[in-house]
Image (cartoon, rainbow, N blue to C red):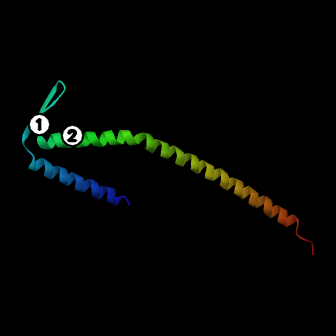
Amino acid sequence: MLLFPIIVALIIAILAVILAFQNTAIILVTFLIWKFEGSLALVLLLAFIMGVIASLLILLPRIIKKGLVASNQKKKIKELEIKLEEKKEESNKENYFNQPIV
């Protein structure tokens, strides 16, 4: 299970290196008052990384909420298991005392 993400990350890294070697042209990027000059591959990789970060920031509240819900459900399951064991013990005691004496 842990091997799959490693393989995917390795493939992405190899593709990034191929991208860098094939796109060495120097370009100028202008954003508002900033100007940045760099290779096309670097600009593409930075844009990709910024997109990944933005996606993670958007998904973060949902991830946190699911984690909290899962934690609460685990606590509830433990409480219900304890109650179930108590009920089983009570039932066993009642059955023991209600048996006819032979």
Q: In this orientation, which residue lies closer to the viewer: 70 or 97? A: 70
Which residue appears farthest toward the bottom when viewing the image? Answer: 102
Q: Residues within 10 Å of mark 1 (few under 14, many from 20)?
A: few
Residue 82 location (% of width, % of height): 68, 54
Question: Mark 2 is on which residue type?
Answer: Leu
Residue 81 location (% of width, % of height): 66, 55
SS of the residue at dot 2? helix
Which residue appears farthest toward the top when viewing the image? Answer: 33
Q: Which residue is drawn at 66% across and 50% down?
A: 79
Which residue appears farthest toward the front when viewing the image? Answer: 32
Q: Residue at x 18, y 50 (%)?
A: 16
Mark 2 or mark 1: whose residue is earlier in sequence: 1
Which of the image's four quarters has the C terminus?
A: bottom right
Q: In this orientation, which residue lies closer to the viewer: 96 or 87? A: 87
Q: Residues within 10 Å of mark 2 (few under 14, many from 20)?
A: few
Question: Mark 1 is on which residue type?
Answer: Gly
Report whether 34 appears left or right of 74: left
**Disc sitting over residue 38 in the figure:** 1
SS of the residue at dot 1? strand
Q: In this orientation, which residue lies closer to the viewer: 62 or 84? A: 62
Which of the image's four quarters has the N terminus?
A: bottom left
**Where is residue 87, by image quadrant?**
bottom right
Q: Residue at x 88, y 66 (%)?
A: 98
**Disc sitting over residue 46 in the figure:** 2
Vertically, is 100 above or below 3?
below
Residue 67 location (% of width, % of height): 49, 46
Q: Which residue is drawn at 27% across and 41% down?
A: 51
Q: How far, Cα to Cα, is label 2 from label 1? A: 11 Å
